[in-house]
Image: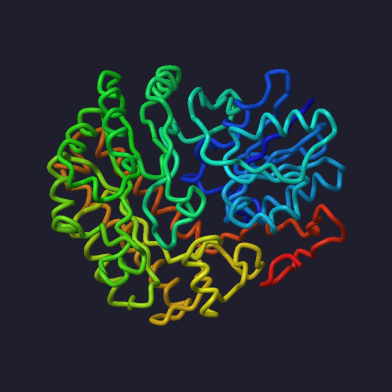
Amino acid sequence: MRLTLIHPAVGRRGKLPYIRAWQMEPLPPAVLAALTPPDVDIRFYDDRLEDIPYDEPTDLVAISVETYTARRAYQIASHYRRRGVPVVMGGFHATLVPDEVGQFAEALVIGEAEEVWPLLIDDFRHGKLQPVYRSQGRPSLTNSRPRRSIFAGKRYLDLGLIEAGRGCHFRCEFCAIQAYFKNTQIRRPVDDILADIRERPRPLYFFVDDNITSNMKQAKEFFRALIPLKIRWVSQASINAAHDEEFLELIKASGCQMLLIGFETLNPLSLKKMNKEFNTMKGGYEQALANLRRYKIRLYTTFILGYDEDTAETVRETLAFTQQHRFYLTAFNHLTPFPGTPLYERLQAEGRLVYERWWLDPRYRYGMVPFRSLGLAPQEIERLCLEARRKFYSYPSIARRSFDFQVNSRSFFSWATFFTANLMMRREVQQRQHLPLGDEDDHSALIPVRSGVVPPSVLAGGIT
């Protein structure tokens, strides 16, 4: 049996190179490869890095779909459908909007793949592939070791991506993670993670957990086990962890170089709408930042702009806050209603979506705001976000933040790394803006599984 795994790009703009910061190893296809019986011949293609050889013989194609990659995934699936090759789709988008994704896949995986993928492969071999494979509950991640050999020869960023846990127990209104995992987290056994690290030495590891501190007790056990390995690592955490002194001591001792933390907003009313009031606990941002600075933890902070209370002054205050605290990196994101989230359902019920399915609408481009705020027009939110990014990653701003010798530039190596990361982000501010979703040069019709075709000009309602 021949199986082709594909990781779709967000989109393509002619022959321009793909955004470098997004070129990290994709773990979902490596997880599927590890779950596949060893006698299956596996080929893997990353749409961000290479052309897909549609005419290469294969029996089955599998694509993991996110909301931003949905349109491109359907284009890829349609090319295989013309050649009579069946396609399986899974991932976040497939679980959150299965009726849509199911129109472009002969089989659909809903939920996590660990328990159902071996069954799907066996069914396919025996000619009885089912239209839906639904995971029941959360799987065990024991012995979950991604098969990274499929990445051989591909030019990814020199980061070791490792999954220590999946999911988050918080219920943020805008977050697709909480909608997918139902506010739960599962973790891999510590020994499995350590073996993963020892097998593939890297200068820096990225633990891709949605929130590495979601289960603090287990997280601390993990950090203690990391200390003897003397590695450098980064990950994502919630800001409430910054008030836990033992946590701070352990991440410092275990080699933490930076945390990505979602500050989201400085406005308490917006935090309440987001269900992120915990951000202001125990003295709020200033105390949390003072704690992190004592342990010299660099910060990649993210802010969301576009809640109804936001004004142009909100954006200016947010930018000033990031400059005052000399954050290592910052993302100024507009609010995005992902399908399946409470935010999407609320805005849809209020009639405030500009596009019913923005991820399919050919008028939509990356960086555009797909809903109407009560405070600012969609185009104004977009402009203000872009302006904030440009100012944060301007040469004067990068230079000022590089003089933070306590945190950002403690050594020549960290100083050089700071400039490399910031200059890459500066270069990509404009490159990301208005990136098309899907390949803009692919004018062929989308072909659903059942009958007929969907023209590439499909509009707001998406697929009919």
In front: 150, or 167?
A: 167
Residue at horizontal 51 percent and vertical 67 percent from the top: 344
* Left or right: 136 in relation to 71: left
Question: Residue 331's quadrant in the figure?
Answer: bottom left
Name the quadrant of the C terminus.
bottom right
Residue at horizontal 44 percent and vertical 33 percent from the top: 163
Name the quadrant of the N terminus.
top right
Residue at horizontal 20 percent and vertical 28 percent from the top: 253
Q: Position of residue 17 (x, y in %)?
A: 57, 47
In front: 306, or 429?
A: 306
Q: Position of residue 316 (x, y in %)?
A: 27, 71
Question: Residue 461's quadrant in the figure?
Answer: bottom right
In front: 256, or 250?
A: 250
* Left or right: 257 in relation to 177: left
Q: Is residue 97 above or below residue 135?
A: below
Q: Position of residue 369 (x, y in %)?
A: 50, 70
